[in-house]
Amino acid sequence: MSGRVFDVLVVGAGMVGATAACLLSRSGFSVAVVESRQPEPFDPTSETGLRVSAFSPGSTDILTETGAWRQIESGRHCAYRRMHVEDRDESVTIEFNAPEFGLERLGTIIENQLVQWSLWQTLQMMAGVEIICPDRVASQAAGDSEIRVVLESGREIRCRLLAGADGAKSVIRKLLGIEQQHWEYGQHGLVCVVQTKKKNPGIAWQRFMQGGPLAFLPLQDGASSIVWSRPEGEAFRLMKLEESDFLAELQEAAFSEDTNWPGEMVSCGPRAAFPLTMRLSDRYAGPRAVLLGDAAHVVHPLAGQGVNLGLLDAAGLVETLLEARRQRTDIGGEKTLKKYERWRRSEAEVMARGIHGIRGLFTPEALGPIRKLGLGLVARSWMAKETFIMRAAGKHRNAPALSRGQALTDLIHPQID
Ligand SMILES: Cc1cc2nc3c(=O)[nH]c(=O)nc-3n(C[C@H](O)[C@H](O)[C@H](O)COP(=O)(O)OP(=O)(O)OC[C@H]3O[C@@H](n4cnc5c(N)ncnc54)[C@H](O)[C@@H]3O)c2cc1C
């Protein structure tokens, strides 16, 4: 057994856990990371990967503070300043333009693998971080001043706080006995990269229709990454179609006389489908332990907010621990963890329930006039659009300071007037 006691043990080095570990280490906390499998290296000469995410401006600010952003930015990415949302049946359209809201961009589309690999490499270079991979947590026991974690390899790690960022099927959440509210949408998100005759000019386009939304997210080379939410059986059928038949159905779903966007489909790469669920953990904290990212919450991808919420958790956790350190209180103590839990759980709940509600407007049971009224109100109200955009951008009042553009060094060494 090691005599060393780490400040924080982060379990899971996905995009969220690795971000938390980088920020914690850069804040001067001693950190250990346990990851079950080494991430795949990112190959810049490869075809664009299937898994991409829309990173909000707040998320890119957080990633900047990890030290990994330079590497990410030097790889494939596509910033978008315009978002077009439309309702196929009721022909309501909503346009969002970044400058209208004082933003330079609405988001940046980046492959998950590039982000995870860049963070992983950044972690490897951090002197204060011990990476244990491959390994998994087998058990944990919290005491008064530390928590002892036993790994499947038999190694024991002692730390003041355990941070579970081990994804939707989190073992840490199960070990802590935290229950979740859980909705199965009976839908799958079908993803693939699509080449269109007319290059995507850098617009995120989303069409709501019965059965689920269809999104075209712009990629650097003018192609689009699509997420097409379909009822389960329908998604499986689309997965099995020949490419030409699949493109014909996609063309039909995307066709719009009004906007003629995204235009003619030319080809597509491999397809994959992911089950869509919403999960909200009843608690985000247990004795000397917290949850973050998909371990704590999973949301429908229609608003592209899953990883963004997770990065806000990572920033929120670091800010909470820095404040505890400034006040010389225990970083794994109940007071500190309750504060994190209250903050992040309420924020995730607002977002998750908002997305759940929007999705509900497009179920067969929802009445057309109600849908039209709801969307029409957002389309006409600048206030509603601003509230929506600033929250999605991670720039609202209650967002962590790092997401609102503050530098980590300013949080570590705050200026006292
Ligand atoms: C179709 C689709 C489209 C999406 N699009 C967007 C989007 O545009 N924008 C957005 O913000 N979000 C999007 N999301 C959601 C986003 O992908 C997730 O929210 C995000 O990947 C979660 O990251 P995470 O680090 O919390 O979890 P994960 O990515 O699941 O990482 C968990 C890590 O923990 C490791 N691990 C697991 N178990 C253990 C264990 N027992 N011990 C040690 N390590 C372990 C895993 O190997 C992994 O590295 C989308 C999701 C889907 C399904």
Image (tube, rainbow, N blue to C red):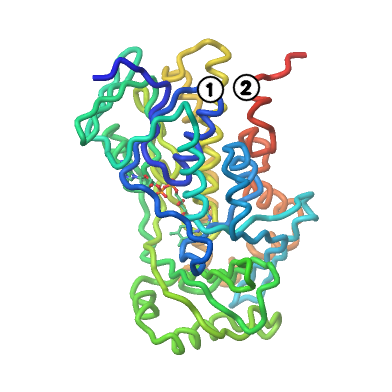
Taking the image as drawn, is residue 417 in sight? Answer: yes
Q: Position of residue 193 (x, y in %)?
A: 51, 72
Circle count: 2
Q: Are marks 2 and 1 in contact (CB under 8 Å)?
A: yes
Question: Residue 272 got which mark?
Answer: none
- Residue at 59 percent of width and 38 percent of height: 67
The kind of residue on which mark 2 rests is Ile
Quick one: label 1, few (<14), some, or many (20+) residues within 10 Å? few
Residue 308 shown left or right of residue 172 in the figure: right
Depth order, front residue of 247/76: 76
Q: Which residue is mark 1?
A: 28
The kind of residue on which mark 1 rests is Gly
Depth order, front residue of 362/171: 171
Task: Report which quarter residue 11 is drawn in.
Answer: top left
Residue 107 shown left or right of residue 44 in the figure: right
Residue 192 shown left or right of residue 56 in the figure: left
Quick one: label 2, few (<14), some, or many (20+) residues within 10 Å? some
Quadrant (top left/top right/bottom left/bottom right) for the C terminus: top right
- Residue at 69 percent of width and 70 percent of height: 93
Q: Position of residue 256 (x, y in %)?
A: 64, 82
Disc 2 is placed on an element classified as helix
Q: Which residue is mark 2?
A: 412
Q: Is residue 79 above or below residue 176?
A: below
Disc 1 is placed on an element classified as loop
Q: Is residue 380 above or below residue 335?
A: below
**2 vs 1, front mark:** 1
Task: Report which quarter residue 285 is drawn in.
Answer: top left
Quadrant (top left/top right/bottom left/bottom right) for the N terminus: top left
In space, the residues marked 2 and 1 are separated at their CA atoms by 9 Å
Q: Is residue 138 above or below residue 190?
A: above
Looking at the image, tell me whether mark 2 or mark 1 is earlier in sequence order.
Answer: 1
